[in-house]
Each structure stands twice: as structure tokens, then as C-alpha cells.
Amino acid sequence: MAQQELIYGMHALSAVLSREPERVIEVFVAKGRDDERLNKIINLARKNGISLNFCHRKTLDDKAKGEQHQGVVARAKPAKILNESDLDNILQTTDNAFLLVLDGVTDPHNLGACLRTAEAAGVNAVVVPKDKSATLSPVVRKVACGAAEVIPLIQVTNLSRTIKHMQSENVWVVGTAGEATQSLYASSYKGAIALVMGAEGKGMRRLTRENCDELVKLPMAGTVSSLNVSVATGICLYELVRQRSLA
């Protein structure tokens, strides 16, 4: 049997049904629930000739392995995995590319939240290493609220090499690090740019850090030493958005 994946959560499934309905094999829906968003999913499934199964909540709970499914779970063909050639295509066809690089973010909730924020901020693609990183899982898709189906997630074999390639395409690479001497707000972010965020707790790996054009940090006035990576990503991305909107 070909590899399959589960998709759950209304935003995630609605996005797939709207953009790639051919991937969805069958949809499981909570019995006796009358909800406008759920009805939209049911109608999209019917419109595309996708099998619908109405079942008890316990069945959905079991399929989603305890994760919050919002009354809907689907069985689907896996999405295409994007790689270096897809990133190249984005760089060649996008003026002033806006990229987010996540160096080893392993928590699927954090990756999902980063994808959601990146899509909202207008990021063209999110780049992650193939190894030691969360990938597109049902949890990531659910947390991303549909963004995982919209924004390209590029998995690369060698992140340092990819950063050097981006630089060769005139992308300015800004890394975030607690030991940086310059504040996020003291730098200028115009033109093609890639923001690099490090892993939970550990930050960027040494080679990643060394290959950045510039290192910046978030000013921390309180007693905590760091922020959750998805929160820090949101703050940094929107400072770049603010400055790019003034260009």
C-alpha cells in the first residue's frame, strides 16, 4: 500500500480540499454535529467525489491519537516533498525573496506555529534541514491552521551549503543569537533576505551561525533568558515586514 498520512483540524483539511483535493482519499466526520465550517468541508468532499464516513467522536479520537481534531479527520496521499531545486525556482522567480530558515526546530507545535506566522507575514518559503528537524506531520498541519498547505516548506540536505547558495543569489542572511551584540531593531532589512532562527534551547548550530552575514538578538529586559522559538520568530519576522513595507 502506498504511503498515506492523516490530516485533521478544520483549517488544515479545508485548505487541502480547496487546493489539492486529489490527495484526499476519505474523510471521517463527527456524527450529529451541525457546524458551518464542518458543512463546508462535507460539501467540498462531496463536490470532489471523496468518500465520507460519519462516526462517533471516540473513533476520531483514536484516529488522531488524542490530538485535537475538531470533529474531522482525513486519510490522504502525502504532499510532495520540496527540496533545493524548488528553492532555486523560488529564488529565480521572486523579486526581493523573503525566506525563513529554521535550524533544527524539532517540536511539531513550534514548526506549525512558525509556518502559520511565516505565511501571514508574506514569507516566500520556509527552509529546514532534512535531519534533526520536525517535518510536515498531522500535528504541524493542525497547528499551522492551513498555512502548511500554502507556504512551501523546503527540506535541504546541507543547511550551511544552502545558506551559501542563497548568498550567491544576493540574499542577505540574518541569524538570531543570544550572544549577538546588535539588537534586531538596530539593523536594516531591505532587499532579498533570509531570517535564520535556531533550535529550541540550543540556538543555531556553529556552522550555521558562522555562515550568516549578520547576527542580531532580541532585547530582553525581564528575568527570562529566552523566548519560545515560534514567539521569537513572529517578533523578528514582523520587524522585517515593518521595514520592508517602508522600502
Image (cartoon, rainbow, N blue to C red):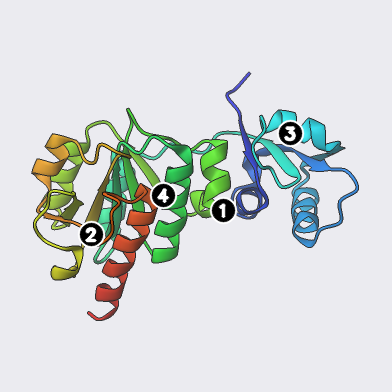
- First in sequence: mark 4 vs mark 1: 1
Query: Callout 1: helix, strand or loop?
Result: loop
Point out the frontmost of discs 2 and 1: 2
Instruction: From the top left corner, tell me how far across and down residue 17 is, in percent.
Output: 66, 50
Point out the frontmost of discs 3 and 4: 3
Indicate left or right for 197 with 141 as reference: left
Q: How much space separates mark 4 and mark 1, taking CA atoms? A: 15 Å
Instruction: From the top left corner, tell me how far across and down residue 169 is, in percent.
Output: 15, 54
Query: Callout 4: helix, strand or loop?
Result: loop
Callouts 3 and 2 close, C-beta under 8 Å:
no
Residue 52 vs residue 63, the one in the foreground: 63
Indicate left or right for 183 with 154 as reference: left
- First in sequence: mark 3 vs mark 4: 3
The residue indicated by pointer 4 is 152
The three-letter code of the residue at mark 4 reads: Pro
Q: How much space separates mark 4 and mark 2, taking CA atoms? A: 26 Å
Residue at 66% over, 29% down: 65
Q: How much space separates mark 3 and mark 2, taking CA atoms? A: 40 Å
The residue indicated by pointer 1 is 145
Can you name the residue that lies furthest to the front here? 223
Q: How much space separates mark 3 and mark 4, taking CA atoms? A: 29 Å
Crowd tier of the residue under label 2, counting other residues whose Cα lies within 10 Å: few below 14, some 14–19, many 20 or above: some
For the C terminus, which image quadrant?
bottom left
Residue at 86% over, 36% down: 56
Q: How much space separates mark 3 and mark 1, taking CA atoms? A: 19 Å
The residue indicated by pointer 2 is 218
Can you name the residue that lies furthest to the top here? 1
Point out the frontmost of discs 4 and 2: 2
Q: Is residue 163 visible?
A: yes
The three-letter code of the residue at mark 3 reads: Asp
Query: Callout 3: helix, strand or loop?
Result: helix
